[in-house]
Every structure is written in structure tokens, then in C-alpha cells.
Image: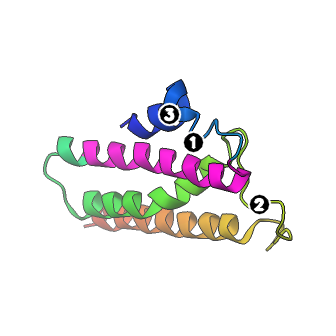
Amino acid sequence: MAGALLADLIVPATAAQHMLNDAWPPHAKFHDAQYIVMSILLSAVALALLLQRGGGTRARVWTSCAILATPWLGLLCAMLFPGTAVQDPEFDPQSALGLHPQVLLAAILLTLLLGAALLAGRTEQSR
């Protein structure tokens, strides 16, 4: 669960080759941060699946949505790491509704996934 976090950010010898590598551009660090967050989230989902008992439609939909949300949550959380950037500085800033297009896409898709999970919960409750 914490392997990528330890190796890429915490342990000095290996972090110097990754997040603490001054030669890495901010966008490369961004994708490493995204990988770190995705590794933690996917580990949490796997742990939840291992500990899950039973499981109806609602549980399956929530699990599916969690798996599908992981890369997008990783993208959003990667912006919180120091020294990262959604886009390298040599490229013109892109914007859609004031957001980088991938950030906007992440927000839209996460909203749709949350809506689907909530709808599945309401549908199962009404049965």
C-alpha cells in the first residue's frame, strides 16, 4: 500500500531518483505523484474487496466506481504534491472553463461516477 510512496518520495536513496530529483521537470513529477496516489487508492480498494462479505448490486457498483475513479483521483491529488505541475512550462496554458482540460474531465467523470453509485444505492433501497 505504501511502496510507491516510500520508494518515490520518502526513502532518500530512491526518492532522489524520483520526486526529489531536481532534473525531473514538474510534469514528470506530477505523473509520479499520480502513480503514488493511484497505488495507495488501488491498494485500499483491493483491501476492501478482500474484507467484503456478501455484496449485492450496490456493493458491486461502488467497487466498480472506486476502481474507475482511481486514476482521476490520482490526477487531482497529484496536484497537491510539491514541485508538480499539470503541464510543463514550455507549453501554452490550456483552459476549459478556467481549468486544465484534464482537471475538468476528472471533475466531470468523478461527478458522474458518484452519481451512478448513489443512484445504485437508491435503486437497491427502493426494492
Left or right position of 17 against 101: left
Quarter location, residue 27 = bottom right
Q: Distance between the residues labelled 3 and 2?
A: 23 Å
Q: Look at the numbered discs 3 and 2 and tell me whether their residues touch, using CB distance below 8 Å.
A: no
Q: What residue type is labelled 1?
A: His
Q: How far apart are marks 3 and 1 (CA)?
A: 7 Å
* Local crowd size for mark 1, using a 10 Å CA cut-off: few (<14), some (14–19), many (≥20): some
Any magenta on residue 3?
no
Which percent across, then down, holds residue 82? 71, 38
Left or right position of 36 against 61: right
Question: In the rendered view, how is the structure colored?
Answer: rainbow
Q: Distance between the residues labelled 1 and 2?
A: 17 Å
Q: Mark 3 points at which residue?
A: 14
In the image, residue 79 above or below residue 100: above
Q: Mark 2 points at which residue?
A: 88
In magenta, the rendered stretch is: 24-48
Give the position of the N terminus as an image quadrant. Answer: top left
Depth check: 36 or 59 in front? 36
Q: Is mark 1 on a helix, strand or loop?
A: loop
Q: What residue type is labelled 3?
A: Thr
Q: Name the residue under label 1.
A: 18
Residue located at (32% from left, 64% from top): 61
Q: Is mark 3 on a helix, strand or loop?
A: helix
Magenta span: predominant SS is helix
Left or right position of 59 against 14: left
